[in-house]
Amino acid sequence: KAGVTQTPRYLIKTRGQQVTLSCSPISGHRSVSWYQQTPGQGLQFLFEYFSETQRNKGNFPGRFSGRQFSNSRSEMNVSTLELGDSALYLCASKVGQRERNEQFFGPGTRLTVL
Amino acid sequence: GIQVEQSPPDLILQEGANSTLRCNFSDSVNNLQWFHQNPWGQLINLFYIPSGTKQNGRLSATTVATERYSLLYISSSQTTDSGVYFCAVGSSGAAGNKLTFGGGTRVLVKP
């Protein structure tokens, strides 16, 4: 079974631009979560989607948004990029919505904002 | 929210040595996972262990949920064990369905 895939793997943008990242979960997994990893803040939860609905959101500004499609694939969007948005963005999938379900992570998208 | 602390923050080992990494958490959890982050950034699942003990080759893990800690054991370490090890917990309630990560333990295994 294929793992979680993320595209693109690397991205360079300039301040003020917007960016869209994509995540395809493991086949059969219906929950997708997004995390941001930075050297200063570590790994932080962005949001979770299940059945095309956002179920939980972390403490991030409204510039960060996401959505999930009927095939469980998810995208996250960051508008009006700031230098501090430079980070590794990780997507994770799990079978269902329950917190007990084991999460599996994709390879990440490394975003650099210049 | 729930707090997760990992110790030590850094660990330098000689190849062949054994080590123990610790993860303390501040509240009851329904999910606990250990990950190894490879040099390219991907989080590799090591254990899903909200309670009890598991072993996988040279790695083993124990979670004592009632005392709110988990341990990851690395035996006969190899240079390929180098990297950052993360503990992450999931809990129900207001925290919702998310993993809260510890700060990680950076391991360097020297040949």
Image (cartoon, coloured by chain):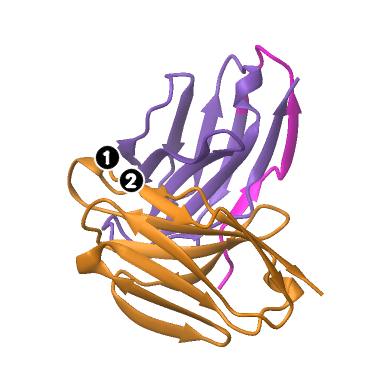
Chain colours: A purple, B orange
Do the residues marked 2 and 1 share a common chain?
yes
Residue at the image point whose x is 37% and y is 76% from the top: B62
Image marks 2 and 1: residues in contact by CB distance under 8 Å: yes
The x, y position of residue B39, in whole percent, is 72, 56
Q: Quickly name the residue at label 2.
A: B3
Q: Quadrant of the C terminus of chain B?
A: bottom right
Q: Quickly name the residue at label 1.
A: B1
The CA distance from mark 2 to mark 1 is 6 Å
- In the rendered structure, which amino acid carries the disc numbered 2? Gln
Query: From which residue to which does the magenta span run?
Result: A1-19
The quadrant in which residue B64 appears is bottom left
The residue lying toward the viewer, choosing from A96 and B107, is B107
The reply to whether residue A29 is in sight is no
The residue lying toward the viewer, choosing from A37 and B15, is B15
Q: With respect to residue B96, does A80 lie above or below? A: above
Q: Describe residue B15's horizontal placement relative to residue B61 as left or right.
A: right
The x, y position of residue B43, in whole percent, is 58, 58
Q: Is residue A7 magenta?
A: yes
The quadrant in which residue B52 appears is bottom left
Q: Describe residue A47's horizontal placement relative to residue A76 as left or right.
A: left
Most distant residue in the right direction: B111
- In the rendered structure, which amino acid carries the disc numbered 1? Gly
The crowd level at tag 2 (other Cα within 10 Å; few <14, some 14-19, many 20+) is: few
